[in-house]
Image (cartoon, helix red, strand yellow):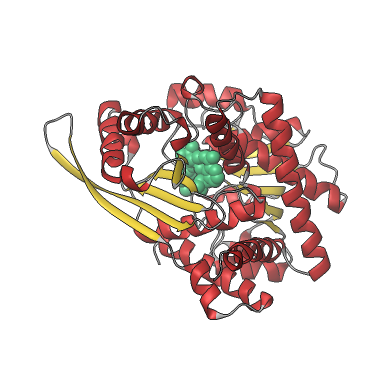
Amino acid sequence: MTPGASTRSAYETFLNASCDRLGYGSSIISLLSLAAMEIKVEIPIVRDNGELAIFSGYRVQHQNVRGPCKGGLRYHPEVDLEEVRGLASLMTMKTALADIPLGGGKGGINCDPRKLSLRELETLTRKFVKRIHREIGPNSDIMAPDVGTDARVMGWIHSEYSAIYGHSPAAVTGKPLALGGSAGRDKATGYGIGIVVKEYAERHGIDLKNATAAIQGFGNVGVHAARAFSDLGMKVIAISDSRSAVFRRGGVDIDALMRHKQERGLLSDTEDHEAMDPARLLETECDFLVPAALGDAITAENASRIAARTIVEGANGPVTSEADRMLKERGVPILPDILANAGGVIVSYFEWAQNLQREIWPLDRVDRELERILGKAARDVLDRAAAEKLDMRSAAFDIAASRVKEALDATGF
Ligand code: NAD
């Protein structure tokens, strides 16, 4: 199964189980399962060497009954429609669980951004917006950064969209601050992981001082989760990117690793960090394991070797449904993606709201509001899991699915 198909199939498994518990009929299951709109466009660009290259771009709008579709834009060679579909449906669940007035969407282009020049990337992004601009916007579908995209890409989207519709900062989030981006958006997902872990630890009487963590992924989510953990007094003992990994019993030095990666392109070979096989990172013995790279990191093949006491899904869909079942049997708790990494979409919501109201919030207000909304979502999940004797993913899906159903019912379905 491709990673995309697996994310989609895991979503279907979790959704069907949830609808079963909630006693929902087939029409509601279809509405929660099918996407409202799926767009595929071909995007030809002239490469710097004069050759023509054609990429496929996707945008899936899953549900907008609670608000405009919201979700990231991914640049990765393996992006396909199945993957975008699965990720878009997860966004519907995530925004509903956070109880923010947005729906679910996702997009992607099947390119390797590391192999494109800045000019090629900008041309590709602007052409994608030219192809799909009628279907996106502040009241319909709002993009944000994801794997392989960043604030600069969001800035190009803002500029291209605004050239057609006039100044429209609320059409995209995760923009540079100079273009109406929000304070705190950059760190929001990783910072949110810290908020969720803190709520979980408080509920279960776990002392976070010196608790250990291993993080897979050294991108936006991984780096900011590492910072949030160290602010909580935890030790990140191992961290990896796609080609390298390091271990340090006393806690890795994120700033030093960032400098090292910038200079050498790898995390390993730093003087005071031990190099490790990135494939073994997931097997590190630790209190919290955070897969924060791509989907399908933990599968039936490696689930039995996971040695962490708790898994925190920083990435979207990092645990397949089969691995989820195996880990449940072994009693390894999982803080699910739709809760653990919801900090990003919550601060994206703040950015959208600030842009619509022509407001600029200071960082302390963003952090405070994020703690309020995500802290409540975490407590809702912990409460429901305890009350119904459910694992946290099931509790999270039940809360989210019932909120979407309530909205669908209110529209007259
Ligand atoms: P990113 O592109 O900034 O970073 C991804 C990182 O993963 C890179 O360091 C890359 O080297 C690493 N990686 C890729 N394959 C790997 C492998 N096999 N082993 C170890 N590392 C590997 O992406 P990001 O924005 O940090 O997103 C990471 C995950 O978090 C994705 O699943 C994304 O959908 C999810 N997510 C991101 C946000 C956000 O705000 N950026 C919000 C919610 C969820």
Residue in the image at 52% along x and 27% along y: 181
Residue in the image at 46% along x and 52% along y: 105
Residue 41 higher or lower than 144, as above or below: below
- Extreme-front residue of the structure: 412
Query: How far from the left and from the top, in percent, is residue 220?
Result: 53, 35
Q: Is residue 411 visible?
A: yes
Quadrant location of the N terminus in the rendered image: bottom left
Query: How far from the left and from the top, in percent, is residue 69?
Result: 48, 50
Q: How many marks?
A: 0
Q: Quadrant of residue 349?
A: top right
Q: Is residue 293 visible?
A: no
Residue 263 higher or lower than 230, as above or below: above
Question: Left or right of 8: which side holds 276?
Answer: right
Query: How far from the left and from the top, in percent, is residue 405?
Result: 61, 67
Question: Left or right of 169: which side holds 205?
Answer: right
Nearest to the observer: residue 43 or residue 194: 43
- Extreme-left residue of the structure: 50
Nearest to the observer: residue 284 or residue 131: 131
Query: How far from the left and from the top, in percent, is residue 332?
Result: 71, 61
Nearest to the observer: residue 193 or residue 234: 193
Nearest to the observer: residue 170 or residue 299: 170
Q: Quadrant of residue 372?
A: top right
Residue in the image at 38% along x and 59% along y: 37
Residue in the image at 68% along x and 56% along y: 307
Residue 380 higher or lower than 247, as above or below: below
Quadrant location of the C terminus in the rendered image: bottom right
